[in-house]
Image (cartoon, helix red, strand yellow):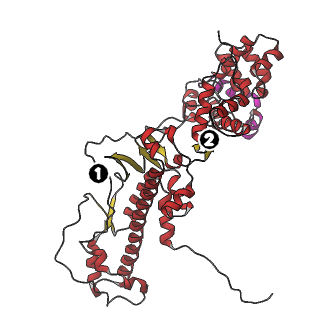
Amino acid sequence: MKLGLQLRLKQTLAPQLIQSLKMLQMPILQLEQTLRHELSVNPLLEEVDTLEPAEKTEDTSEVDLKETDKEIDPRFEKIDWESYFSDELDYQVKSTFERRTDEAYEQAPVLQKTLYDYLTEQLSFLKLSEEEHLIGEYVIGNISPRGYLVCSVEEMAAELKLPVEKVQKLVDHIRKFDPSGVGSRDLRESLLTQLEERGHKDTVAYRIVDQYINVLDKKSILQISRAMGIPFEKAQQAMDLIKSLSPSPAHGRFEGAALPIMPDLAVEKIGDEYVVIHNDKNSPRLRINPGYRQLLKAGNKTSKDTKKYIREKLEQARWLLNSINQRRSTMVRVMNAIVEEQQEFFERGTAFLKPLIMEDIARKVEMNVATISRVSNGKYVQTPQGVYEIKYFFNSGIANENGGEMSKRHVKRRIEEIIKAEDPAKPLSDQEIYRRLQAEGIKLARRTVTKYREELKILPARFRKRIVE
């Protein structure tokens, strides 16, 4: 054991900076919740209903801090209390969006049944003994939100210390419930159940699922038709039927309602210019409550603990309001820079989106790339062309024959258009798509075509082949 001295350098972030970074990352709905929480826990904050500044008062006396207890943090002694509690300077967060009295608010989503609730309700309709009902509830509890049974009958029987036959009886009952295929152990069992309930048990589609489910993503329809010794047309019809089945028993049935997108920013054309507006119309307007000034003016009448508490809450309120204002100004600056770079997009639409990277905007607004990333991720902007996530405007470029660049999204859209226009009986290979793009002056590698096609979730040519009557 040895004693010694070590010198270490440690970098810490100021609380104000941490708070500013957190505020910048928040989407507008989360910011609104945070502000309302702070409003409820910090008595020095108050919400104002009007955007007009408070009326001036004739009271210009200074706060007497000479009687303050010495144990209070000395940094608070440097605060100009009158300037922060003055009625002239209410220190409130003001909105750049006008409130509209005739605005229609979207109704809150109604609470929906879960798959568990839906299956339990169907279970109650069966004539079961108390023991069977409890077994049924246990089985339903082991069904995933997608509708699959996550453990075997033997495992459930062992856990319940009951014969396997009793548990299997309830599993068989539940597999007849709606949605079709619920309680299946895997995709194969689910698809077979769905086909059986549709009356397609002794069909080509049933045989394909039963025998070839594990290779459907590797074999084309032609290969399956040859392996089964059936005409291509029958194999194609069977595959069309299989594609109409649900990929999981509960797919799309018990998902929560989609959350509305609330744009943080709006870009509007006023005259010949595009103006960026911060959309905080639903956020509370906060200011520091001037009423607490009287407590600090009271001198010895106010206890040192009360004064210390007020000072701490005042500091927190100032940090919060500064962080909100900084968030707004940062987002507006970044979006203004994006509008300048993507002027053609706002004028003419998505086909004219230019290649743009975050480093370009960071240099333009003299900010860190990480700051641009925080502004872009998870936040939306309302534009004349629609609502887009801010990071949508950032994308790499592809060279063209004119020496210029076009956006990656434009190239993807062109690949999608080429495939949509192809002959279903003779789908285009990636090599053929590559040649067409080259003929249009779009320079990219053959493997890049395959990469973009896969990102678009479009199948290879052999899987897209169809017989058209």
Look at the numbered disc 2 and give the secondary structure of its residue. Answer: loop
Question: In the rendered picture of this protein, how many numbered marks are placed on residues?
Answer: 2
Point out the tag, 2 or 1, that comes first from the N-terminus.
1
The one nearer the camera, 356 or 201, is 356
Going by the image, does 291 lie left or right of 310? left
Residue 277 percent coordinates (x, y): 37, 52
Q: Within the magenta stretch, is there residue 176?
A: yes
Left or right side of 76 for 398: right
Please give the residue where the numbered disc 1 appears in the rendered image.
98
Q: Between marks 2 and 1, how big is the CA–CA gap? A: 45 Å
In the rendered structure, find residue 400 and report the number of the disc placed on it.
2
Q: Position of residue 415 (x, y in %)?
A: 62, 32
Q: Observer-nearest residue: 33 or 367?
A: 367
Please report the bounds of the magenta region as a residue range.
154-179
Answer few, some or many: residues within 10 Å of disc 1's Cα (few below 14, many 20 plus, some between 14 and 19).
few
Q: Is residue 41 above or below residue 465?
A: below
Q: Which of marks 2 and 1 is in front?
A: 2
Label the magenta part by its dominant secondary structure: helix
The quarter of the image holding the N terminus is bottom right
Amino acid on which the number 2 mark rests in the picture = Asn
**For the residue marked with disc 1, what is the amino acid?**
Glu
Q: Judge whether residue 37 can be spotted in this image.
A: no
Quarter location, residue 292: bottom left
The furthest residue to the left: 58
| Quarter of the figure with residue 120 | top right
Query: Which residue lies at the image location 34% right of the left edge and 70% below the top edge?
Result: 44
Percent x, y of residue 275: 36, 51
Task: Give the residue displayed 65% in from the left and 33% down from the top.
Answer: 437
